[in-house]
């Protein structure tokens, strides 16, 4: 796999190919903006610091959805929208790509132990989709669709992971 993925653009193309194949061919979802968004999310979340990019007002990294939700409620405008969008991405990533990690993320000692990641993801994408000014006009319908089709997108991302793991194990 190292020979195929030489840089960020190659990685983006790989995720785009897997995502397009899975969503269009396997699931019958022909929605290029949605597919592009998901491929971009996978490319961003290769970096650990992107998964945990939300910080509170003093710069502390927020690692739990419950903390991110509180932080979003304290913000206004674009920063609020960005935190809610990130919560949607964060919950979709874990429920779709790495669902086996949910038991650790939601241990009883964590604030997230009573949260339903699917419901919080849907809610967060819906809130982020309400920002429709010029800067967000193109992305708002995609976020709305992610809210409505969260479960299907989660299943699709799990299938995307299955595909890249097939290639990785064959290498």
Image (cartoon, rainbow, N blue to C red):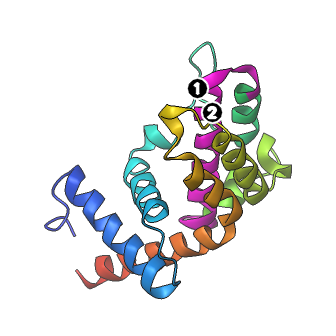
Locate residue 13 relative to residue 121 in the image: left or right: left
Q: Residues within 10 Å of mark 1 (few under 14, many from 20)?
A: few
The residue shown at (71%, 26%) is 71
Is 63 rendered above or below residue 108? above
* Up/down of 38 relative to 24, above or below: above
Farthest residue, direction right = 114
* Residue 141 in view, yes or no: yes
Q: Can residue 53 be seen in this view?
A: no
88 within the magenta span: yes
- What is the magenta range? 73-99
Which one is in front, 170 or 83? 83
Separation of marks 1 and 2 at Cα, in angstroms: 5 Å
Quarter of the C terminus within the rendering: bottom left
x and y percentages locating residue 56 in the rendered image: 63, 21
Circle 2 SS class: helix
The residue most toward the top is 58
Identify residue for label 2.
81
Residue 97 location, x and y as percent?
53, 65
Q: List x then y, in percent, for residue 6.
A: 15, 57
Secondary structure under tag 1 reads helix
Question: Residue tagged by mark 1?
Answer: 78
- The residue sitting at 71% across, 48% down in the picture is 126
Confirm or deny contact between disc 1 and disc 2 (CB under 8 A).
Answer: yes
User: Does the magenta run of residues contain 29?
Assistant: no
- For the stretch drawn in magenta, the main secondary structure is helix
């Amino acid at each position: 796999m190292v020979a195929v993925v030489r840089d960020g653009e190659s990685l983006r193309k790989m995720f785009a190919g897997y995502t397009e194949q899975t969503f269009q061919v396997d699931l019958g979802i022909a929605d290029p903006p949605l597919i592009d968004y998901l491929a971009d999310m996978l490319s961003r979340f290769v970096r650990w610091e992107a998964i945990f990019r939300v910080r509170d007002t003093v710069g502390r990294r927020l690692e739990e959805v419950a903390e991110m939700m509180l932080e979003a409620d304290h913000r206004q405008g674009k920063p609020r929208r960005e935190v809610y969008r990130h919560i949607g991405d964060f919950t979709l990533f874990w429920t779709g790509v790495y669902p086996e990690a949910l038991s650790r993320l939601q241990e009883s000692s964590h604030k997230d132990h009573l949260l339903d990641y699917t419901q919080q993801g849907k809610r967060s994408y819906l809130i982020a989709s309400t920002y429709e000014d010029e800067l967000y006009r193109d992305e708002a319908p995609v976020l709305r669709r992610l809210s409505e089709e969260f479960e299907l997108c989660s299943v699709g991302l799990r299938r995307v992971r299955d595909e890249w793991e097939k290639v990785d194990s064959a290498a």
